[in-house]
Amino acid sequence: MTDDIIVEKLLQENDEFREAYEEHKAHRKVTEKLEKKHILTTEDEVELKRLKKLKLSLKDKMNAIIADNKENCA
């Protein structure tokens, strides 16, 4: 089973994965918006760093769920 298929399955069946995925997507949108600004305020820089850390944490969580799912399917 490919990662894309596993992700689609998890989005439909796993609430924890779906919530992490949606939260990651929302943080990504805000991060992209901040990164497009030519000049960042101190608050923007702090927020950008915070969001990047949150996104990384969520990505790690999703990858762990994917890995667990792969093991269960093998």
Image (cartoon, rainbow, N blue to C red):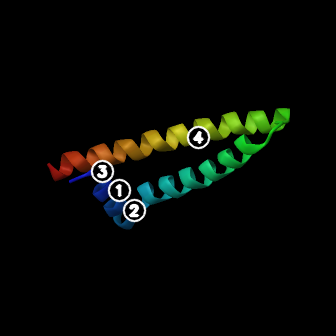
Q: Residues within 10 Å of mark 4 (few under 14, many from 20)?
A: some
Q: Classify residue 42 by image quadrant.
A: top right
Q: Amino acid at mark 1?
A: Val
Between circles 3 and 2, the one closer to the viewer is 3
Decide which of 16, 10 is in the foreground and name it. Answer: 10
Element at label 2: helix
Q: Amino acid at mark 2?
A: Leu
Q: Classify residue 60 by image quadrant.
A: top left
Q: Residues within 10 Å of mark 2 (few under 14, many from 20)?
A: some
Check contact, mark 1 vs mark 3: CB within 8 A.
yes
Where residue 65 appears, x then y in whole percent? 35, 47
Q: Residues within 10 Å of mark 1 (few under 14, many from 20)?
A: many
Q: Is residue 31 left or right of residue 55?
A: right
First in sequence: mark 3 vs mark 2: 3
Check contact, mark 1 vs mark 4: CB within 8 A.
no
Q: CA distance from mark 4 to mark 3?
A: 22 Å
Q: Is residue 23 left or right of residue 40?
A: left
Q: Residues within 10 Å of mark 3 (few under 14, many from 20)?
A: few
Residue that sits furthest to the left in the current view = 74
Which residue is the site of mark 2? Answer: 11
> At x 29% / y 58%, what residue is drawn?
5
First in sequence: mark 4 vs mark 3: 3
Q: CA distance from mark 2 to mark 4?
A: 19 Å
Which residue is the site of mark 3? Answer: 3
Check contact, mark 2 vs mark 1: CB within 8 A.
yes
Element at label 3: helix
Where residue 14 appears, x then y in whole percent? 37, 61
Which residue is the site of mark 4? Answer: 54
